[in-house]
Amino acid sequence: MAEGTTRRRLLTGGAAAVTALVGLGATSRLFGRSKGTTTMQTQTSTTTVTPRSVERVLSASSEHWVGDGFRVRSVISPNGDPRVQSPFLLLDHAARRHFEPATARRGVGEHPHRGFETVTFAYRGEIEHRDSTGGGGLIGAGDVQWMTAAGGLVHEEMHSREFTAKGGDMEMVQLWVNLPAKSKMSAPGYQSLLAADFPRLTLGAARARLIAGALGTERGPARTHSPITIFDLEFGETGEADFELPTGWNSLVFNLEGDVRVGDGGRPLRPGDLARLDPTRGGPVRLSGAKDARVLVLSGEPIAEPVVSYGPFVMNTQEEIVQAIRDYQSGKMGRLG
């Protein structure tokens, strides 16, 4: 039996299915910290003008469908090394795809989450979201949906009725952001962030939209549970964009589209690839891009806690994963009406 089928049965089965989890195994990644480690630096050094270098480049997976509405490539996943990507867990990019007019709505039907947040960036098309807490709404081009699953909920993400009827181009990014242990069982929440809500900044040849955290003197509107900066930018002309990010954080640059180079020496970054900057060096981050190139930048202070993931649940121990499955099966995460 395929592992995906087994996982679906664990979510819908009874006590025997929960017991089977031990045999199948949840994925556990340990992010340890020695007792002597000091608090991470959160101010970027300004004593050098040498651009920060790229520590590694991660390539996206092959394309696969999520539900029947989103054809994505994954560049990081909860199975990845948290020392490299924490507090970020997953990044899926549904590149631009045309959908013909239809009567049946596409998307991802009812499913649970616990222990983290999902952040959906709408670049083209429209999505309707609803969840078991009563949260939800519609996001279109330029909007961002920030859902805090925390203690658990059930939700769905579907192409909007209008988009389904008219058809058109769809492009989305979904990011999963981990929650610290103290917040994993807190109340779920929902933030609908519209395109007009984001501060705009000029960074050399590019124009940036600040979604969360600080960039220069500006702050993004999204509320976060750990220190994070997220923004995207588009090059209005061929040139460079320089900015500062904190030393010691995991800082990731994802190429959405176009010709992009990153860091000291201008390392090429293909569309769909993600660069991790050297976290040990201060100095400016330098991006070089062709006109109309687009980039998503993620930077966050690592959460130094174990990561145990199983399908739609991300917790700190396997016992917590087992409890999440039981709670979902018993209806404690709610249902969609």
Image: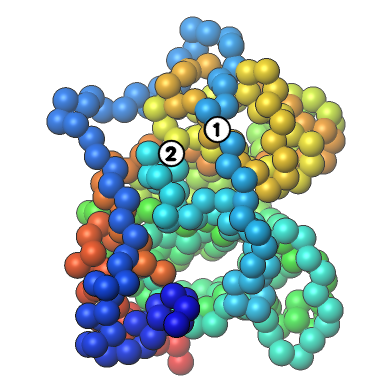
Q: Is residue 67 above or below residue 331?
A: above
What residue sits right under mark 1 in the picture?
Answer: 56
Other-residue count near label 2 (Cα within 10 Å), few / some / many at <14 / 14–19 / ≥20: many
Where's residue 318, x and y in %?
A: 23, 64
What residue sits right under mark 2 in the picture?
Answer: 84
Where's residue 116, x and y in %?
A: 38, 60
Which amino acid, mark 2? Val
Q: Residue 86 versus residue 333: which sits nearer the camera?
A: 86
Determine whether label 2 and label 1 are within 8 Å by CB.
yes
Residue drawn 79% across the image and 41% down it: 258
Q: Quadrant of the N terminus?
A: bottom left
Q: Residue 19 versus residue 76: which sits nearer the camera?
A: 19
Residue 167's image quarter? bottom right
Which amino acid, mark 1? Arg
Q: Is residue 266 above or below residue 250?
A: above
3D distance between C-alphas at marks 2 and 1: 10 Å
Q: Can residue 162 be seen by looking at this rendering?
A: yes
